[in-house]
Image (spheres, grey):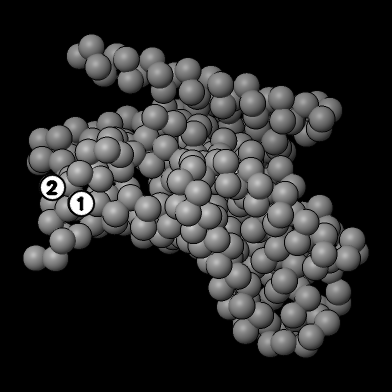
Amino acid sequence: MSPTADAAKVAAPSAPQDGRWRRSVRLQELGPLLGLVAIVLVIGVTHSRFFSDTVIMSNVRTASVVAIIAFGIVFLLAMTEIDLSVGGIYGVCFYLAAKLMGDSSVDPYLAAVIALAAGVAMGAFNGVAANAFRVPVIIVTLGTFSLYRGLVSVISGGEATPTLPVDSSFFTTFGGDWLGIPVIGWFAVVIGAVLTFVMQKTRFGVMVRAVGSNREAARFSGIPSGRVRLYALMLTGLLAALSGVLSLAYFEAGDPSIGRGLELNVIAAAIIGGTSLSGGTGSVPGALIGALIVAAITSGLVFFKVDPLWGDVVTGIVILVAVGIAGLLRRQAART
């Protein structure tokens, strides 16, 4: 057996512990799910148009953009790390693909692949820098947050995206609907299912949880914490790029400010969905539920005619409530 496999075996929880972990995750998801149902009912009962097909599909599309990136944040939070640069990566990849398709006349599919590779590279840069400086990811990404946003301004030149070949099958396929559901929504569901399996059943998921539970113990057991963190950041960069490319397929254009503030919604979705800031656990399905909650709240503010400037205030309050409830549940679990 390889050293890495031995390390994963050492770090893996025993069967009863693993069963308790899975039950804990399910309980983490139940609260946000009930919260989502309550929010939808409150808005829908007072404003029936909230249940219209147009509004529902709009919320699904908005939530999917956030959820795809939030899946990567779940892995980082499970390691007690946070990536603040995901909005910048999203924006860079969105505009890079648009520039290649428009100004350079690159085939849309090839441009999308290049943008995905760029997202992985930016995530890798975050990981290499964090490991080289031996600092938390949040410190490095506080710098790359501005760096990547600056790259968006450089790539866009402060102007809207160029004319795109919207008649390409890339836009009609990935920007449209399938069986009445936005294609990006299907991506969110499939990717969520795959990453749920990765978190719960694979060696990588075990190592992520082990590092978040006790970094020193994981290091002594032979788990390469730096490498695991690097891979998690590369995954997050890939997901941010994918979300950007799929957004481009739908919008078919954009402005230089696209992606600004996205990192707040992404982190909020992961936390609201039940992933603990203290590490050691994470819920990928919960992140999808959290993204739907964020989308529903944003939409609800419009229906209740609340000033959009209060959007971040409401999101912040929801995060604080989610963190508070999670803390109460952890203390209750510790007592029992």
Q: Amino acid at mark 1?
A: Gly
The N terminus lies in quadrant: bottom left
Q: First in sequence, mark 2 or 1: give its number.
A: 2
Q: Is residue 314 above or below residue 145?
A: above
Q: CA distance from mark 2 to mark 1?
A: 9 Å
Is residue 272 shown left or right of residue 11? right
List x then y, in percent, for residue 85.
Answer: 62, 50
Q: Amino acid at mark 2?
A: Val
Is residue 266 shown left or right of residue 128? right
Residue plotted at (68% across, 25% down): 314
List x then y, in percent, for residue 280.
Answer: 32, 37
Taking the image as drawn, is residue 158 in sight? Answer: yes
SS label for mark 1: loop
SS label for mark 2: helix
Q: Nearer the viewer, residue 336 or 10?
A: 10
CB within 8 Å, label 2 to label 1: yes
List x then y, in percent, for residue 148.
Answer: 70, 57
- Disc 1: which residue: 222
The C terminus lies in quadrant: top left
Is label 2 or label 1 in front?
Answer: 1
Taking the image as drawn, is residue 87 in sight? Answer: no
Residue plotted at (56% across, 73% down): 117
- Disc 2: which residue: 10
| Other-residue count near label 2 (Cα within 10 Å), few / some / many at <14 / 14–19 / ≥20 | some
Residue plotted at (75% across, 61% down): 151
